[in-house]
Amino acid sequence: MRRAWSLVARHRGYRLLLTAGLVSLAGDWVLSVGLTYQVYRFTGSTLASGTMLLAWWLPQILLGSVAGVLADRWDRRLTMVTADMLLAAGLLPLLLVHGASQVWIVYLVAFWEGAIEQFFTPAQAASVPHLVDADELTAANGAYGQAQNVARLAGSAIGGVVAASGGLTAIALSDAASFLISAALLTRIHGYGTAPPVAQGDRRSLRKFQTAWTAGIRMCAHDPVLRLMIVFIAVTGVGEGINLTLLAPFVSRVLHGDARAYGTILALQAVGGIAGGILIAAYGHRLPARTLVGAGSALFGALDLALFLYPLAWPGLWLAGLLIALAGLPGAALAAGYTTALQVQAGDGHRGRVFGAFATVQAVAILLGIVAGGGLGSAIGIIPVLAAQGAGYCGTGLFLTVALRARRESGHYSQHATTR
């Protein structure tokens, strides 16, 4: 714990980036929870709520890899600040929504917010290695993962209260405020922000942009480690989509819980992630990123299997809460190791486009998982499908551990991150 606090205390730029992320992510959860609630209240249609979520996810598929290329060519700090300002401005049309007839405005806002976030995320991920020392990168990513879970826990709770008490006006203004605070914090990061040098002719040339984009795609396809990681994120992304689709029906139909039980289980998952983030921030530097990814995925899958299979013997709710909280610990290790592995392997000149390409693959995989979860859950049952996604995490984690070890021995796995 001392090491985690020391990391935050010693690196002012990282501290500002972490705080900005915590504030804006909490605002995102306020918006996500609030919009879902309000759209359903206006329309009474789960299809309308699902359309809103689809509008939010679609830009990640359409723009993820393109935005990543620009994150490698633009000043990253300025990119994040500008994105925050545009995200805040994009929420203003929500003030015009007062009923079902204006819900189409919500869809446009959701698409806009999802599109602009594609430029912020790779710029943020590519910035972290410049703000901490190389041997602190895993701990820094663990602390950021912890902040994400804190934001999820606080933002989800606040979002429900804000939506119920102030409606869309309160939701829009509170999230806009979070983006403005984030932008103000980011402007105070000094001594870093410029992307790797790019020739002036390259900046103005569409052809050169296309070349840079295809270079990022080729790197992901031909680099042995990144190729393995692409397979990993595709398989686990499908699993995440299945989990998103079937976790609520699992709590309701299998565990016979109500909405309060479902909310409690989600909160416990976030609590487990916070605890895991603390541990990774304090001790993650002792393990290679590849170990955190592989072992974290395998253990996460094993706990998922236990969570989804134990009701066959005893359908009690309290054990589900315990298991999902425990799963947050390897989940935090998996997330920190995954981010660190991409940051190190991509190198500074390609980080943005690699993260963008991976975000696109993940979004497609999650959407496939959502479709598969809905169809297969009805066809063969909730428990078998959820158990299969847990087994997928286990198998993929074990495979990745063995494969990355072999790549390291052959010299393909990079051991050094770009430092300040």
Image (cartoon, rainbow, N blue to C red):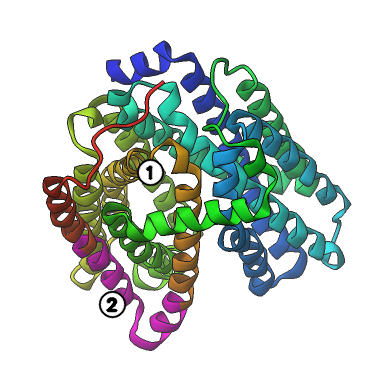
- Left or right of 397: which side holds 205? right
Closest to the observer: 7 or 210? 210
Closest to the observer: 317 or 183? 183
Judging by the rendered image, the residue that carries numbered circle 1 is 346
**Mark number displayed over residue 39:** none
- Left or right of 40: which side holds 105? right
Few, some or many residues within 10 Å of mark 2 (<14, 14–19, 20+):
some
Residue at left offset 22%, top offset 68%: 309
Chief SS of the magenta region? helix
Residue at left offset 23%, top offset 35%: 415
Q: Secondary structure at mark 1?
A: helix
Give the mark nearest the N terminus, 1 or 2.
Answer: 1
Closest to the observer: 97 or 412? 412
Would residue 33 be seen by someone viewing this image from the given angle? Answer: no
Label 1 vs label 2, nearer the camera: 1
Up/down of 419 relative to 402, above or below: above
Q: Quadrant of residue 219?
A: bottom left
Judging by the rendered image, the residue that carries numbered circle 2 is 384
> What x and y, as percent, mark residue 312?
22, 73
> What x and y, as percent, mark residue 326?
26, 46
Magenta stretch holds residue 98? no
User: Amino acid type of disc 2?
Assistant: Pro
Residues in magenta, as a range: 372-395
